[in-house]
Image: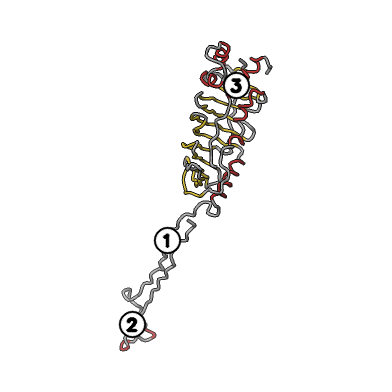
């Protein structure tokens, strides 16, 4: 058995899901004007002379009440993206998301015979850090910097992804050597293609909904404390896809709930640096082991 075959077939991304794809009220009430009219009644028989005009007593002196300011009526908050239709909002959210320099995608997706989990930070330079869980195989950890791609998985992962039976001594020897250990490959090595595809930001966003004329606007929501607004796209099977769009800052997509991601996939850490510190310890250089040089 060739190790190149083992690693290349093992490193297949599971990041995919099938995707079918209140105006502002000025409620202030009319301004009320309070008019105070003061009158002094003087008897003709006791008309005071101009020189001795008596000063009115406090009891007789009218007090002018200050003009009362009307209390403003409560106003409804303006709907986010009120000037956009559902399809326009989805297109704008996808444009912002696909234009990001980096992001982290976290969640669980179904398909391919099982449910897999993804937690991966990726940037526009092809760096990545995180892990994914392949249905029926188990987790895979991954780090890629400018020169190398590092990965680590358990024996069950390699057995599920490689040819041969449990009685193949060569296969089992290689799995024993690689299991639960960081393995290194040059990023340009042919064996690393499956890994580097996982670290491609555009590829990671390939299943994110970008446009649909049937998209409708939903309601205000929050995603991990961030305010958002939803848009929903119907599917032929009746199960819709709902996208949560950030209402503060850039209109990034914050969350996607779809038929293949019913628990939701969260997008976060926009613009943050991806940690690509190489693993330390007993790292296996796979090309050196194969005799291909490092």
- Residue 63 in the image: state x and y as whole percent: 36, 72
Q: CA distance from mark 2 to mark 3?
A: 106 Å
Q: Which residue is mark 2?
A: 41
Does 77 appear above or below 54? above
Residue lying at 51% horizontally and 25% vertically, measured from the top left: 139
- Nearest to the observer: residue 48 or residue 125: 125
Label 2 neighbour load within 10 Å: few <14, some 14-19, many 20+:
few
Does 142 appear above or below 250? above
The label on residue 73 is 1
Q: Earlier in the sequence, mark 2 or mark 3?
A: 3
User: Quadrant of the rendered structure where residue 69 is?
Assistant: bottom left
- Residue 94 in the image: state x and y as whole percent: 58, 43
Q: CA distance from mark 2 to mark 1?
A: 41 Å
Q: Is residue 123 left or right of residue 68?
A: right
Q: Nearer the viewer, mark 2 or mark 3?
A: 3
Residue that extends furthest to the right in the rendered view of this protein:
293
SS at mark 1 in the image? loop
- Residue 263 in the image: state x and y as whole percent: 46, 36
Q: Earlier in the sequence, mark 1 or mark 3?
A: 3
Quarter of the image that includes the N terminus = top right
- Residue 87 in the image: state x and y as whole percent: 56, 49
SS at mark 2 in the image? loop
Q: Which residue is mark 3?
A: 7
Q: Name the colouring of the figure.
A: secondary structure
SS at mark 3 in the image? helix
């Amino acid at each position: 058995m060739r190790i190149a075959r083992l690693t290349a077939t093992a490193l297949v991304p599971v990041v995919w899901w099938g995707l079918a794809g209140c105006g502002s009220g000025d409620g202030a009430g009319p301004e009320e004007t309070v008019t105070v009219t003061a009158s002094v009644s003087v008897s003709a028989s006791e008309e005071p002379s101009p020189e001795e005009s008596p000063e009115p007593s406090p009891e007789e002196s009218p007090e002018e009440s200050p003009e009362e300011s009307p209390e403003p009526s409560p106003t409804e908050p303006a709907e986010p993206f009120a000037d956009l239709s559902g399809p326009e909002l989805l297109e704008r959210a996808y444009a912002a998301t696909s234009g990001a320099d980096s992001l982290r995608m976290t969640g669980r997706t179904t398909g391919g015979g099982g449910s897999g989990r993804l937690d991966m930070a990726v940037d526009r330079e092809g760096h990545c850090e995180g892990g994914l869980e392949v249905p029926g195989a188990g987790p895979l950890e991954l780090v890629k910097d400018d020169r190398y791609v590092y990965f680590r998985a358990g024996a069950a992962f390699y057995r599920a992804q490689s040819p041969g039976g449990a009685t193949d001594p060569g296969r089992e020897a290689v799995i024993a050597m690689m299991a639960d250990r960081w393995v290194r490959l040059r990023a340009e090595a042919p064996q690393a293609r499956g890994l580097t595809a996982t670290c491609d930001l555009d590829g990671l966003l390939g299943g994110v909904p970008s446009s649909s004329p049937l998209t409708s606007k939903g309601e205000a929501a929050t995603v991990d404390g961030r305010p958002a607004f939803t848009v929903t796209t119907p599917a032929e099977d009746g199960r819709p896809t709902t996208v949560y769009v950030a209402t503060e800052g850039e209109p990034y997509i914050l969350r996607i709930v779809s038929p293949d991601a019913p628990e939701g996939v969260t997008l976060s850490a926009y613009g943050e640096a991806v940690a690509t510190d190489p693993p330390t310890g007993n790292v296996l250089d796979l090309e050196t082991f194969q005799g291909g040089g490092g």
